[in-house]
Structures are given as structure tokens and as C-alpha cells.
Image (cartoon, coloured by chain):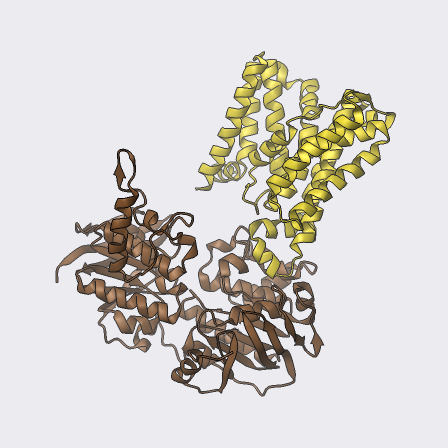
Amino acid sequence: MTTLITARGITKHFGTTKALDGVDLDINTGEVHVLLGENGAGKSTLVKVLAGIHGHDAGTIEGKASLAVIHQELALVPELSVAENLFLNRLPRRFGFVDRAEMRRRAPELLERVGLGVDPNAKVKDLGIAQQQMIEIARALDKNAGVLILDEPTAVLTDTETDRLLEIMAQLRDNGVGLVFITHHLDEIQRIADRITVLRDGRSVGVLGPRATTQHMIELMVGRPIDEQYPRAAQRPGQPLLRLENFTRRGVFRDINIEVHAGEVVGIAGLVGAGRTEVARAAFGVDDYDYGTVEVDGKRLPRNDVQAAIKAGLGLVPEDRKGQGLVLTATVGQNLELATLANRDQKRLHDIAGKLRIKGRVEQPVKELSGGNQQKVVIGKWLLADPKVLILDEPTRGVDVGAKVEIYELINRMTAQGRGVLLVSSDLPEVIGMSDRVVVMAHGRVAGELPKGATQDQVMALAVQEISA
Amino acid sequence: MSTISIRRYASENGALAGLLVLAVVIAVMQPAFLTAQNLLNVGVQAAVIAIMAFGMTFVVVAGGIDLSVGSIAALAAMVGALTAGPLGLVVGALCGLVNGALISYGKLPPFIATLAMLSVARGLTLVFSEGQPHETDALVTFLGSNLAPSLPLPLLLMLAFFGVTGLILTRTNLGRRMYAIGGNEEAAKLSGIDVRRQKLWIYALSGLFAAAAGLVLAGRLGSAGPQAAVGYELDAIAAVVIGGASLSGGVGRATGTLVGALVLAVLRNGLNLLQVPPFWQQVVIGAVIALAALLDSLRRR
């Protein structure tokens, strides 16, 4: 094992705030080095300093390995082919023109290295997000990157895709590549990490070995002991508030029957593509459906009518916070009032921001907030609209541990007030830990329902079920 | 005010700072610029573009663009001259509604829908006018006149439209929805905003404002011409952009647009006073637009 990059005492200021404060980091060959920390702890800044995107105010970085960063937002050109993306900016040329034959020859070799069996002539936009990620990794490898930094790559992947990525990472490690891996999923860390550097408030607060417990990681990260990761306080369920009956959209989901009662959290688990988000959107009136009914508090909702759904007491926190939940150009306050424009009251905005413990002023641009606080803004928007049932679609995706627990406590508070919550989540421990019942979907149908206390294995067994139509 | 807060004020109001610098430079080179009469002239010259640009601000804040405002202004003025002024306003709003319907329900990109309207409205103007200018009636002529020797009505109308625009943008649901739609249309939709219906109103407003601008222009000239206001849509867009609005939507203010329109008017007036040949004026104006946008993008970094 040799050290590829040695960083010592890295310090970086942004204005008066210290983003990094004397951080040490070694990147070695054949090692997966995990950077762990809450949002805002300095992980991304550290990566940007290492990559030379930001300068640093103090400290040294030594090492000659070339370094590639795979960001969460992929740097691919959707309209170009896989091969063209692989060789973007250094297309093989012959007589001054692009040498397509050469490209076609070299592309499969590269794709082989990341185990990706796609047609090099396919357009990148036609591939899934996991495949696109692999293309970026392949491109980095072709540039002979000795160090590969992956910034939350699994946030957008399904479980199987994540497994595949971890496999590839293990392979690269065995081939002597130094990997830096940023993730919020502690189970992934336990599966692949050789070393874990925990950052908090810009400082390195500990370097752990591969056998670190999740409890230990969380406490280092948050800086205080955490009692419970999933603090669900169950209520006695009341009358049904949301009822989906024979809910069907041809080719997407079929015969979905789900009831959410007052005070209840019903989880929907399943693989990506099982139709969970589609059910949520159609119930909320964003997308159309073919037959079946949606009732809120005994009242049948018209199809394709978001306004009517809101009026009846339904709310939806969509899965893509930045793309669907927030107006990033606007302030916290403007986002909070989005669903209740007719009822504008500055005091209520400040109240809700305080109640949700949103770190940030109401007048502040929402894009300056961390992911967890942004998500609280989206939830706050709905709380202002006073819904009877709130559908949460992946509410803690990309949210750090501390803010996650706060969102769980919000869920508890909502059900204590007699609201119902439909929790769509790909995070198995979360959907099991926070739901009173878990509905598992597979291939657009309800594969089964599990009571409180189900195991991950039970959920997975239903989720991967082949259901005959 | 301390230096720091002055600096912050200037950086948040880049266009205003630019306007002041521009005015000072011109005043130094040609003191006649600062006479009351000339400043009133600048205001009058700014009025037509400013009113049009206020309507454009709604559209741009909502993430769209309206290329048809120059043609709508001409059509409204012509209809006003041939029939009655108020009918011109109705026609302008209707043209805007058609734009909105094409964009909302026909799912056309705003660029294409309003480009089509640019041609249709101009064509209708030529058809109705048979290619001839037509005199405006007393009501429309009044819009371009002076209330008192130093009180030009176009200037007052500009200020009135400025106030209305500010009110709509900051104090009405429609205005708040414009920012939401332009900032993130999907999020607006999922928050229960009927995006399509809002767009109808937004483009109708733009058409209405364009029609008002057309009537003011015709009033000043005492006649509506078939080739009036050609290319004004570009000045209106320039005013909005100089004022700090983002063409990708979600950002923009009435004050910015007013300042943007004044920058263009001051520049034209100054270049005239300095006897810069008209051909060169175009070059200078283009350069200033680029410079303004450049400064704005530097400031945002």
C-alpha cells in the first residue's frame, strides 16, 4: 500500500466562516476511504480543495496521483452517444475528423472495466442514472485517475444498483485505485470502508477503522449521543382519512388498495420502478389514472386536479426536493407560502419556521440552506395548508442524520395531531422503523402488507416477488 | 450611510448605479442634459418602452418571453385610431390571451408562440390600415399630451404603470405565482398552482401593457402607423434584463425594469445631445446592453 495523496492541516475560509479547520487526510492505493459527516460538515469543500476547484488558506497537499471526482450531478451530455461521452474533449481523430472506428473499438474495453454492457452508440439520455454514473467512472479510469472521489453516488441509486456500484468499487480498490467515498448510508460504509474520516463543523473529529459501529459513527458525526434512530411514537388509529380503491393506471400500477387512518403512518416500500411514486402522484392529482377511486376523509377526489386534492386535505412532499419541491430562486418564506398563497401572513411563516427549527431566516434564499433544512421548508409548506393526510415521498433522501431525526419527530407530531402520513421510502430501516404498517409494492401491485416490527428480509422477499398478472 | 452600506446598496442595485454613472458622464460632457426640459423629454421617451417592459417583466419573471409586444402595440394603436382607444386595449389583451393559450394549452414554447403573434399582429395592422397611417382621436391624442406645461402625461402614465406593476408583483397572488412558476414550474404545479391558467393571465397582462404602450406612442405622434413600434420588443427585453431580471425566470423587479428603461432612454438622449451619428448610436447601445448584462453576471458570482 502506498500513499497517493497526503493532505495536512487543510484550512479554508469562506468570508468569515471557517469551512475547513486543519483537516488531515491520506488517500492510499487499494483503500476505500469514507468521508462521513452531516451536511455542512465540510465534506464537499474538502473534495473541492483536493480537486483544486477551491484554493486553501493553510495546510499542504502532496501527491502526484491524478484525481477524478464523480459528482452527484453528472457531467454527461445527454444527447451524445455513450462512446462520445467516454471520450468527451479528447475524441480520437483521424485527418482532423472524429475517428468513429477507433471510438467504437476502445469504448467496449472501457465499459468492460466497470461491468457495463451497453451499446456504445446508445444516447446517454436513454440510459438509467446508475448506468450514467458508470460511464463517468469509466471515463475517469480512462484518464488514468489514480484517485477516484465519489460524492454521494448512491443517493440516486436503487439497492441493486448500489450493490453493483459497491462491487465495482471493490474491484477498483483491488486494482490499486485509491477511492474516496462520500455517503450518508451507514450500512454501505460498513460494507465497503477500509477507513472512515468523520468531519464535524470543518474539523476531523475521528478516524475509524472498518469495524466501527453505526452508533459510534453517528455520535461522532452529530457530536452528541443519539437515543434512537427511528423514534416512532405510535398512536391509536382513528377513522380512515385516505383510501385508494382498485386504483389503477394501465402499465404502471394495478388494483392498489391502501387505507391511511388518522394518527397512522403507513409505509410504502418496494424497489425503484415498483410504482410507488406513480401511485402517490396520481392520488394527489398530478398524473391521471384509468380507474379506481381516491377518497380523502370520505370525500371522493376528482382525477387530475391538484387544487381539489389540496382542498380536500391532501399534501405531497415530492421525491425530488430541488426539482419538484422548492423554488430555489425564492426565499424560505416565499417557499413556505407557496401552497397557501391566498392566506398570506408573515407571523404564521415565522411561527412555522421556528416550530420546524429551520436553520435559516425566513428572508434567506432557500438555496443557501442545507438539504435537511430545505426538506423542512417543503414539509412546512404543507403544514401551513393544514392537510389531513400528507404523502411523503423519500422525505430524508440526501438529508443528514441529525435532520433525519427531526423529520421523524415531525411525523410523530403530525400523527399526534390526528393527521395521517403515507411514507414512501426506499430506505428500508426507515420505512420499517417509522411506519405502523408497511405496504410492499412490486411490479405496480401490492405484494403484501407487513405489521409493525417486520424485518428487512420480509420486506425484500415481498419486494422482489414476481407477480403474475 | 457608511461606505460599506453604500457599496452593498450599489452592488444590489447595479442598474441604478449604472444609470447614475451614465447620467453624470453625459452631464459632464454636455451640461444641457441636466435642464428640466431635457430630463422631462427623457422621461417621455422612456415611457413607451417602460410600459411595454413592465408587461414583459411579468412574462420574464414567470420564465417566459414575449416577442410580440411591438406588433401588439402597433395593432392596438391602429385599432384605437380606426375605432376607439379602449378597444385597442381589449385587442391587445386578447392577443396576449391567444399567446397564453398557445403556450399553456398548445404547449408551444413561448418563443415560438409569440414569434407567430409578432407576425400575425403586424400583418393585421397592415391589413386594417391598408398600409396607411391613421390619425388618432382626441382621447388617444390626450394620452400623449401635456397636462400642464411641464407635466407630460406619458411620464405620469409610466409612473402609474410602474406602481401597478410593483403591486402586482409583490402584493398579489398572481404576482407571487409568477415567481414560483418562473423559479420552478414543477414545484409550483405540485403546490397546487394552476400553472396553465396563470400563464393565460400573465401573457394577457403583457398584451394589455403593450397595447397601452402603443396607444401612448400613437398619442404622442398624433397618429398610428402600420410600421410603428417595430423592434420595440427587443428594447423592452433589454430594459428588463438591464434591470436585473433573469431570462431563466424567477427573478425580476419593477424598479429594475424602470431603471433599465431609463438607462436606454438616457443613453439615446445623451448620444443625441453629444451628436453621435445615429448609425453609431446603435453600436453604443448594443455595447451598453452587453456591458450591463456582463456586470450583472459578474456581480452574481
Quadrant of the image occupied by residue B257: top right
Whole-percent x, y for residue A81 in the image: 37, 49
Left or right, B99 with respect to A87, comes to: right
Left or right, A30 with respect to A451, comes to: left
Q: Is residue A222 visible?
A: no
Q: What residue is at 60 percent from the left and 26 percent from the top?
A: B264
Pick the residue in front: A279 or B198. A279
Q: In the rendered view, would you say A150 is above or below B2?
A: below
Quadrant of the image occupied by residue B193: bottom right
Q: In which quarter of the image is the N terminus of chain A?
A: bottom left
Q: What residue is at 86 percent from the left and 31 percent from the top?
A: B84
Whole-percent x, y for residue A250 in the image: 58, 70
Whole-percent x, y for residue A60 in the image: 20, 50
Whole-percent x, y for residue B26 in the image: 56, 19
Pick the residue in front: B208 or B157. B208
Pick the residue in front: B247 or A169. A169
Q: What residue is at 56 percent from the left and 20 percent from the top?
A: B282
Q: Chain B is drawn in which colour?
A: yellow
Q: Can residue B48 be seen in this view?
A: yes
Q: Chain A is drawn in which colour?
A: brown
Q: In the rendered view, would you say B294 is above or below A101?
A: above
